[in-house]
Structures are given as structure tokens and as C-alpha cells.
Image (cartoon, helix red, strand yellow):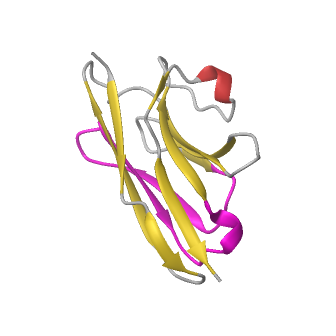
Amino acid sequence: QVQLVESGGGLVQAGGSLRLSCAASGPTFSTNAMGWFRQAPGKEREFVAAINWSGGSISAQGRFTISRGSGGNTVYLQMNSLKPDDTAVYYCAARLVAVLSMRLSEYHYWGQGTQVTVSS
């Protein structure tokens, strides 16, 4: 059974940093593209960043950096200079293929999400 489990969310002051983690269990994801999305209250879920097996990545936020653990089944999101507008539930997602994508519909597996709250 595929499972994605996020951790690392919490409450932080504006200007602070957080590091989110996503651990994938089940079939290996070491060669799959994985990504982070977020959803703020009353808004649609939006793309944050994605990474492939070789470390290639794309990011919608220059303040955020996505990386992958050496085993390939853990993905991290380092978030710096956080702003109140970054407040959202952050979701980890995985594709069935290695190609990067910013499209929510192209991700097949999703975690339950972790809350990030940035206070002003």
C-alpha cells in the first residue's frame, strides 16, 4: 500500500524558516517525480515545487527549495523567509513517472497534508 506521510509543519513567525519532510512507503518512489502543493483556506490547491530522481527540480517560489534524500523515498521542502501568505496545508504528492510536472492532476498519490501557519 502506497503511503505518503508529511511532517515538519507548524507555527512560525514571518521571516522564519521551516523544513517539511515527506516519507514515501510502499512501492519504491526512487525513480518517480515527487512534488509539493499547498492549499490555503478558500483557495485552490497550487503547485509549490517538484523534483525528479536525478535531482532536477522546478519551483514556483524562489524562497523554497526542494530536495530528495539519498534513498530517493524522502523529499524535503526547505522554506525560508516565510510570509503570512504562505499559510496553508502543504501536501506531498508522487507521480507514476519520472517526468516533472506542475499539474495537480498528473500526481497519483497524495499525503494527508501538514499545516503551516505563518504569523505576522
> Would residue 120 be found to the left or right of residue 80 on screen?
right
Residue 92 included in the magenta stretch of the image: no
In the displayed image of the protein, which residue is found farthest to the front?
Answer: 42
Residue 28's image quarter?
Answer: top left
In the image, residue 80 lies at what x, y percent?
Answer: 54, 74
- Picture layout, residue 32 above or below residue 38: above
> Would residue 114 be found to the left or right of residue 87 on screen?
left
- Picture layout, residue 77 above or below residue 2: below
In the image, residue 96 lies at what x, y percent?
Answer: 47, 17
Question: The magenta stretch spans which residues?
Answer: 59-87
- Closest to the observer: 119 or 57? 119
Residue drawn at (55%, 46%) of the image: 57
Residue drawn at (44%, 45%) of the image: 55
Residue 10's image quarter?
Answer: bottom left
In the image, residue 104 lies at what x, y percent?
Answer: 66, 29
Residue drawn at (27%, 15%) of the image: 1
> Would residue 50 be found to the left or right of residue 19 on screen?
right
